Structures are given as C-alpha cells and as structure tokens.
Amino acid sequence: MKRVVALIPARSGSKGVPNKNVRPLGGYPLLAWSIAACHKAATIHRTIVSTDSPDYAALAQQLGGEAPFLRPAALSGDRATDREFIVHALDWLAARGEEPDYVVHIRPTTPLRDPRLIDEAVCAFKGSTAATALRSVHEMPESAYKTFEIAASGQLKRLGSENTALDAANDARQQFPKTYQANGYVDVLSTAFIRKTALIHGDHVLPFITPPVVEVDTEDDLAHLEFQLAGAPEIARQLFA
C-alpha cells in the first residue's frame, strides 16, 4: 500500500499575526483545524507537524498530531522555502525507514477544510499518470488580466505587458480568461519526483479547484473567519464532533 503522510508547517516566527498558527479560531487553536481535517481524511496515514517551537510541538501532540522532530532555525525564517522543510521532513523519515510515497502539504493558515476534498485531491493525484504534483486553487473573482502594474515611468500598465493603454481592461469580466489563485487548501506531492528532481511541483501540476477560502495573513482575516464560523457552525462540528 502506498503511504500518504500529511505534513503541516507551523513555524513560530510569524510577524504579521504573531503566533498565528496557535491563535484561537472558533474556540480551537488554528493548528487544530488542520490536524482535525487530516484525521478525518481517509487517505491520510500519518499527520506530522513540522515546527521549530517546542511549545508548538507539544500542542500538536496534545491535538493528536505527531511532532517527532524540531525544524532547524535555518529552515524556519521568513525566507525559508516549502521545498526545504519538506525535504527536511522526508530525510528524517527516510533515515528511519518511514519515507512515504506521497506528501500532502496542509497549511494551517487555510483552516476551514472539508476532509472529503482532501481525499478527492489525493485520489485525483494518485489516478494521474502524468502529473508531477497537485495544487489547490480557487477562481479569482476578478480575472488577473484586468489587473495592473506600475510602469517604471510611473503610470499604470496592464499586468505582464508594456502596454499602458488601459481602455481594454474595462471590458466585461466575462470577456477575459478565468484565472486562479493558489489557496493552501491541499497540495499533493510525489516523494519519488522530489527525490529525482529536487523540485516539489514540477511542470505538470494538476489543478484541484476548491471553493474560495480565506487564508490568515492579517488580524482582519481571523475576524472574517470568526464571522464565517458564526454563520456556519456546522463547519466546526464536522471536524471536532
């Protein structure tokens, strides 16, 4: 049987929202939402939290996750990459003969998940013979083709273009291609691909379209999520009942 390990990154050095990975949301630490979703997902065999904090590790274990190692400080700063912490975890597991076939990357900053969608994503990636990875996305409410950059000369220009004539950007949104935003809901990665290429996503990434979700980057995001939960308490019941 091919093994599937969920890997949840939870470093302690957040600046925008201090200690955001353990901040309360709906009466539970933010980290608890991701651990609970992984426990409810039938395709996940182990749920491991990668953190640099002994306190976060202890909390993860209290919540039912594993925190069998601490991530080095060099892999826990603002500029640390996903690839670095994922390879660190795989190396730790491989040294013990426990390396999985698949890694499910679950970001705690996207807390409101349906475990059934995690299972759908894992099955979709397993069923693909060409995909190098799977990433969750949701449709952007406004096509990126209607957005702008500021040119070196100071005026607005169409995104990805040197054209500063903007009238065409006022066309109806239905006339532009749909564009999608990565959202941290669920990514599925192949250990074999990572070992072979030293990449985590590659050039044939399977899109997994989810409902729009809120990611926690600011205090306002936490307040918005509390508002969502107040109007839909069944979200918490699904995970914590």
Image (spheres, grey):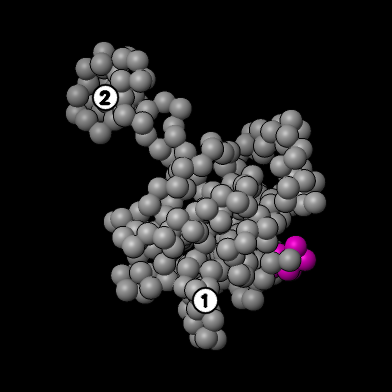
Amino acid residing under circle 2: Lys
**Which is more foreground, mark 2 or mark 1?**
1
At x 23%, y 25%, the residue is 153
Camera sees residue 31: no
Percent of width and height locating residue 140: 44, 32
Name the foreground residue: 8 vs 100: 100
Q: Is residue 149 magenta?
A: no
Neighbor class of circle 1 (other Cα within 10 Å; few <14, some 14-19, many 20+) is few
Determine whether the residue tagged by mark 1 lies in a helix, strand or loop.
loop
At x 59%, y 65%, the residue is 44
At x 39%, y 63%, the residue is 200
Q: Which residue is mark 2?
A: 157
Camera sees residue 123: yes
Residue extent of the magenta highlight: 57-63
Q: Quadrant of residue 168?
A: top left
Label 2 – label 1 distance at C-alpha: 52 Å
Q: Is residue 59 magenta?
A: yes
Determine whether the residue tagged by mark 2 lies in a helix, strand or loop.
strand
Neighbor class of circle 2 (other Cα within 10 Å; few <14, some 14-19, many 20+) is some
Residue 82 against residue 219 in the figure, above or below: below
Q: Which residue is mark 1?
A: 1
Percent of width and height locating residue 133: 39, 59
Q: Which of the two labelled residues, at mark 2 and mark 1, occupies the earlier sequence position?
A: 1
At x 44%, y 63%, the residue is 126
Residue extending furthest toward the left: 162
Percent of width and height locating residue 21: 65, 53
